[in-house]
Amino acid sequence: MTNQPIVAFQGEEGAYSEEAIFQHFGQVQTLPCHSFTEIFQSIGKRTAQFGILPVENSMAGTVAQSYELLLEHDFRVQAEVILRVHHMLLALPGTTRDEIQRVKSHPQALAQCEAYLRRRGWEAVATYDTAGSARGLATHPEPGTAVIASALAGTRYGLITIDSGIEDEPYNSTRFFVIGDDEPERSDMAHKTSVVFAVRHSPAALYECLGAFARNQVNLTKLESRSMRSRPWQYWFYLDFEGHVDDPACEKALLGLLRHASLVKLLGSYPAAPRDGLGDDMPVPGSKSANGYHSQSLLEPTRSPESQ
């Protein structure tokens, strides 16, 4: 027996979420779940110590259900993980490129490889999951069929790689949150903090909330509004900023937010994902380069052409 944590994720073994787990934790025990909700249930029942949740993709945008579940549950974000997504064309051993007639995968993976598939004239067939398509091909062999999935899925299910890195856009990455039920210990790494808040229905309400960060020189890295499911035409604001909640400037900014917002929920202060190997020009989800915003530019027109 080992003391390694069990980490829950949504999908089949070999999913990109499982790749993100191994990138962050190393080799640990993983727990596949059928849904995002099941991840939260697994942590609540103590069948898993942590969960990993995709929250944003550089191509497809925010994963709305992940943020809704974070709002509904009282777990804390423990860390941020950014996974560079490399799509692999996988097939049964002995398959040649000339034999391929159709390619199966999740609709999003097919869309991200659309130009690659179109150039080769292969039929795109949608399935429920990338890793699931790999498992399905391994357990129910189909001549002339390949799948798009991760390298991990190919290894797990004994498939061969026909082609690698077949995504149309080179900068395809997914941002994940590691979640748990404890407050994460503060480290020496750079930190981010994520909060959710709502504003009063009055002039300048959002301006005043954001102004608390500008006045204290706290840099915002994400701001997005989402409709409240129970209150039509009212909105939650999801906000990420650089720094830890215990930093003096961040503490002052949050106090200002509390004064002007109608509700504030802290999702967590956590180590920010390293950018090593991602490239300075890469639009990393949840980063300054992904949306071009600084705390001040959210309140004033942007004058620098470099930030357009």
Image (cartoon, rainbow, N blue to C red):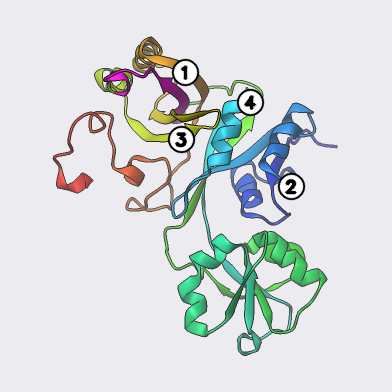
Label of residue 95 in the image = none
- Is 16 in front, or is 140? 140
Label of residue 264 in the image = 1
Q: How far apart are marks 4 and 1 (CA)?
A: 14 Å
Secondary element under disc 4, as helix, strand or loop, is loop
Residue type, mark 2 in image: His
Label of residue 73 in the image = 4
Q: Is residue 84 above or below residue 123?
A: above
Q: How far apart are marks 3 and 1 (CA)?
A: 14 Å
Using the rendered view, name the quadrant where residue 216 is placed: top left
Q: Give the magenta-colored segment's residue range.
A: 189-206
Q: Distance between the residues labelled 2 and 3?
A: 25 Å
Residue type, mark 3 in image: Arg
Residue 199 placement (x, y as % from top left): 39, 20
Residue at image coords 60%, 41%: 53
Mark positioned earlier in the residue sequence (4 or 1):
4
For label 3, the residue is 226
Using the rendered view, name the quadrant where residue 79 is placed: top right
Q: How far apart are marks 2 and 4 (CA)?
A: 18 Å
- Is 305 in front, or is 21? 305
Residue 104 placement (x, y as % from top left): 65, 71
Residue type, mark 4 in image: His
Image quarter hosting the N terminus: top right
Residue type, mark 1 in image: Val
Secondary element under disc 1, as helix, strand or loop, is strand
Q: In this view, does 245 lie above or below 280?
A: above
Residue situated furthest right in the rendering: 1
Q: Nearer the observer, disc 2 or disc 3?
A: 3
Report crowding for label 3: few under 14, some 14 to 19, many 20 or more residues within 10 A (C-alpha): some
- Whether residue 76 is visible, yes or no, is no
For label 2, the residue is 34
195 in the magenta segment: yes
